[in-house]
Image (cartoon, grey):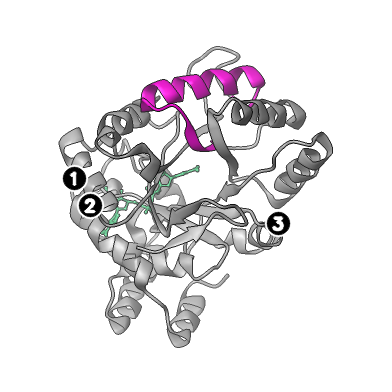
Amino acid sequence: MQYRQLGKWGIKLSKIGLGSYLTYGFKVEDSIAKGCIAAAIDGGVNFIDTANAYNYGGAEEALGRLLKDYRRDSLVVATKVWAPMDDGPNDQGLSRKHIYEQCEASLRRLQMDYIDLYQFHRFDPNTPLEETLTAIEDLCRQGKVLYWGVSEWTAAQIAEANGLCRQLGVRSMSSNQPRYNCFWRQPEAEVFPYCSEHGIGQVVFSPLAHGVLTGKYRPGAAPKKGTRAADPDQNSVMMSLYWTDEKLRQGRKFVTLANDMGVTAAQLALAWCLRQPIVTSTITSGTKPEQITENLKAAEVEIPDDILMKIDQLFPA
Ligand SMILES: NC(=O)c1ccc[n+]([C@@H]2O[C@H](COP(=O)([O-])OP(=O)(O)OC[C@H]3O[C@@H](n4cnc5c(N)ncnc54)[C@H](OP(=O)(O)O)[C@@H]3O)[C@@H](O)[C@H]2O)c1
């Protein structure tokens, strides 16, 4: 495994991170999740991503149980706040109250004393940024959070927060977590350039487009039982973003490019994200240890220029 600094900051993350959305504490039972986590950590993964909202705390609770076998200081644990956790008026968003309460709740569920990277899952237009930025500064001063970041904020929102941090004299964000894969290249336009200039590391999500870029789905054919695409509890985002015959055909052509290089499509998709120097880590997940073991090899894959050109032709920016 190779490690990269989180933008300009001192902490180092594995190039492949392990996520927990729709998997651990939800669809993947603990005995299998334990094998997935072992495959990741034994393979050098130190970066583990979750969120309070994944199965309403279920993912954090599963990680709390399963990460107890590992040294806390060997892990970089990231979680998030913002999404609704209940029906009350203060059960969502980025108010000081909700951030404080959810930070405590996440620490309890994770059975940990601190969060390495606390991320604002989305922007909250109903809370003054000043309130959010001073709340996170206080949590950092209390030692409950070491670094903080955002997810899916626009370049303008990131820039506004950065400017306000300077004015307020509080620490600025270390990371951003955007969706990024061959189908979804929007961050290349504004977010990556702004973050490169300001040393904000990118920990990108859904690098395999929920599995479509592994080439395992075929146009015109029903997805195999046991896959994310076949499960209505899990496939809504995937269906709305990636499930067209055209995209499934692109996924199949992507397999041919990977074969030409002697790697799997999943490895090529992950390595493609990592070709961007501002991408610190690409967060994938897996429902079986074998998937994780396969995916980790992507950290060593360098993509030759002719294949990069063919990928650009297949998935124009
Ligand atoms: N910030 C945000 O808003 C946000 C949003 C989404 C996700 N995330 C984070 O990013 C992480 C990754 O997101 P994602 O799950 O969408 O990532 P992904 O890497 O695009 O998709 C992962 C899924 O693809 C399938 N897969 C993985 N490796 C495979 C392989 N080698 N061969 C065949 N199939 C394979 C597995 O599903 P099946 O085996 O079930 O088919 C796996 O669960 C999440 O766990 C979460 O931590 C963040």
Is residue 251 visible to the viewer in this orientation of the structure? no
Residue closest to the far left: 31
The boundaries of the magenta stretch are: 93-120
Mark 2 neighbour class, 10 Å CA radius: few under 14, some 14 to 19, many 20 or more: many
Within 8 Å: ligand 1 and the Cβ of disc 3? no
Up-down: is 20 above or below 292?
above
Task: Identify the residue at image location x=40%, y=32%.
Answer: 54
Residue 158 belongs to magenta span: no
Q: CA distance from mark 2 to mark 1?
A: 6 Å
- What amino acid is labelled 2 in the image? Ala
3 and 2 marks in contact (CB < 8 Å):
no
Q: Give the residue at mark 2.
A: 39
Disc with the residue nearer the chain's start (3 vs 2): 2
Mark 2 vs 1: CB contact within 8 A: yes
> Do residues under tags 3 and 1 come within 8 Å of each other at their CB atoms?
no
- For label 3, the crowd category at 10 Å Cα-Cα, with few meaning under 14, some 14 to 19 and many 20 or more, is some
Q: Which mark is residue 35?
A: 1
Position of 112 relative to 291 (above/below): above
Provide the residue designation for mark 3.
Answer: 198
Q: Is mark 2 within 8 Å of ligand 1?
A: no
